[in-house]
Amino acid sequence: MTENTAKNERPAELDLLFQRVGTYRESSDFQELLQFVKKFRALAPYNAMLLHIQRPGSRYVATARDWLEKFGRTVRPGARPLLILKPFRPIQFVFEVQDTEGDEPFPEKLLSPFKIPAENHEQACRNSLSKLLKRLPADGVSFHKADNGSCNAGSIGPAPDLPKKYQIYGKDKEVLVKYHLIVSKNLGVPETFATVLHELGHLYCGHLGTPDPSRWKSRIIKDKNIEEFEAECVSWIICSRMGIDNKSETYLHNYLNKNHAIPPISLDSVLKAAGMIEDRIAGHVSACKLLLKDQEK
């Protein structure tokens, strides 16, 4: 997809809401949204945002079946369902805890995001980083460490067209190397993890284009401030939902406190990028078909 094609695409509905109506443009509103997305770790970031639009005060949601089978609670008559997206079907109905009733009290521990103790941060980051790196070849990404200086934690960019190189993904799939992700070998594990998240935020937000528009869309833009803000948001969302402290929190906190409004980012792309990375950590990714060696012409 060319840059011009990307510019001429109709913006996602969420971005139309963001740009024209001004929803979440103010720093305070955007900060509230991020904290809400952080709280609903069992849902994809995009679905958490959909809940916030429908009912900002939600504390916990589940389907009517899950309320009954997992918590012994039933949905109150006349309760209004909330809509979220569901894989392989258009939508799914969920209900907020205040719209349910039951003999047993709802477990309060489910209402607060779990925070990993500081002494366990490194192991949590190591585990998630290992899982994520195993799945990067599926998107044509190769990972490398370099002896970078302190001012260059990491970068991601297109791989040379020639000579072509391939990586094995899974048992026997050869996937074209499309991007090089380079991180300083002088970083600790938590810093390496946060840097990888940041650079992948650039990739999945479309800042480098795309090998397949059905995977993520191309959004090659010229404003570095927008690119950096989007990538920092992606990193913060993932780390905060895992209960891990991260440097993106300081960046966002400083920006939101100093500026009344946030940059004209694509909120749609940020939330989808964060969800894509979480899917890859969880192992839910197949190789990009357009990058498979036997698919090339």
Image (cartoon, rainbow, N blue to C red):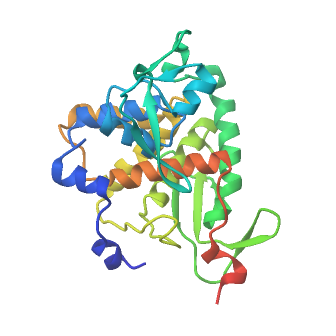
Indicate whether 259 appears above or below 231.
above
The residue depicted at 65 percent of the width and 45 percent of the height is: 282
The residue drawn where x is 30% and y is 57% is 13
Name the image quarter holding the C terminus: bottom right
Q: Residue at x 44, y 70 (%)?
A: 209
Q: Residue furthest bottom?
A: 297
Relative to 262, residue 167 above or below: below
Q: Which corner quadrant of the image does residue 248 belong to?
A: top left
Q: Using residue 178 as the reference point, say whether residue 233 is left or right of it.
A: left
Q: Residue at x 31, y 37 (%)?
A: 54
Evaluate whether residue 112 shows in this view.
Answer: no
Residue 27 image offset from top left, x and y in percent: 24, 36
User: In the displayed image of the protein, which residue is found farthest to the right?
Assistant: 171
Can residue 129 be seen from the camera position used here?
yes
Q: Quadrant of residue 96?
A: top left
- Count every numbered label the image shows and give the total: 0
Q: Position of residue 186 (x, y in %)?
A: 62, 44
**Residue 177 place in picture, x, y as percent:** 64, 71
Q: Nearer the viewer, residue 10 or 174?
A: 10
Q: Is residue 28 above or below residue 87?
A: above
Q: Position of residue 210 (x, y in %)?
A: 48, 70
293 with respect to 28 (left or right): right
Q: Is residue 76 left or right of residue 238?
A: left
Q: Nearest the camera: 272 or 199? A: 272
Q: Which quarter of the rendered picture does the N terminus lie within?
A: bottom left
Q: Nearer the viewer, residue 247 or 7?
A: 7
